[in-house]
Image: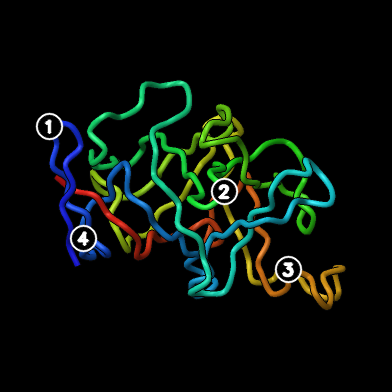
Amino acid sequence: MIFRKTIGATVLTIQCCAQADMPLTFGSAIRVSHAASGGYELETGAINFGSGSGQQAVTFTPRGEGALWLIKGPYGEPTISSGSAPVECGAQIRLEHLSSKKNLHTHNFRSPLTGNQEVSAYGEDGEGDANDNWYVLCDGKYWVKGAHFTLKNVVTKQYLQASKDNNFNQRNGCGNGCPVAGHLEASASKVKGSGTVLKAEVGVFLSK
């Protein structure tokens, strides 16, 4: 399904989903899936860490339950005005959780399961700090829907990662009624490997 919207002098095409080889653009909303786990999706909600920073928790949730994340330009740099510029591999971005308007974030607090860097959702009304900035590392010129990529934090130099071995369950204190039971811990690691490989899945895509 395709819609068109005029913003100033720019006409944007809004698509419910993109072709597999379509470059992702600033202003698009995507779901981020974890390749090695079979498609667990990046998620956050109204639950905060009980340790570490106490900020809003980010996890990878079973497929089909993930959040939409808005692709934005980096903190501290002018907003990309076109709203539909393609994202180049190696570019700095922020990902804003559409429901809470908090940004994907990491810092030196320790994650609860692995002791890696904690990954949280941070900020108010889409504004946080430089730890919200991530490099998109991918092959080719542009970040493309469905292709593998990794996210490396600009400040801490660590990679967003997860593993099916590190899931919240009764053995680590996430029992009956635990809102993240069965989710994978999202954390940031110094090591780039199979656990850091991600894909951008269906969402709302903008193009000129």
In this figure, which residue is indicated by the disc labeled 4?
21
Contact between marks 3 and 1 (CB within 8 A): the answer is no
What x and y, as percent, mark residue 42?
54, 60
Q: Residue placed at 69% from the left, 71% from the top? A: 165
Counting residues from the start of the chain, the first of labels 1 and 4 encountered is 1
Report the amino acid beneath label 2.
Ser
Where is residue 167, by image quadrant?
Answer: bottom right
Q: Which mark is residue 100?
A: 2
Quadrant in which the C terminus is drawn: top left
Q: Is residue 96 above or below residue 21?
A: above
Report the amino acid beneath label 3.
Pro
Q: Is residue 73 left or right of residue 118?
A: left
Disc 1 crowd, CA 10 A, few/some/many (<14, 14-19, 20+): few
Looking at this view, is 166 or 182 the one in front? 182
Counting residues from the start of the chain, the first of labels 2 and 4 encountered is 4
Counting residues from the start of the chain, the first of labels 1 and 2 encountered is 1
Q: CA distance from mark 3 to mark 4?
A: 35 Å
Contact between marks 1 and 2 (CB within 8 A): the answer is no
Where is residue 132, by image quadrant?
Answer: top right
In this figure, which residue is indicated by the disc labeled 3?
179
Q: Colour mode?
A: rainbow
Q: Which mark is residue 9?
A: 1
Q: CA distance from mark 2 to mark 3?
A: 17 Å
Report the amino acid beneath label 4.
Asp
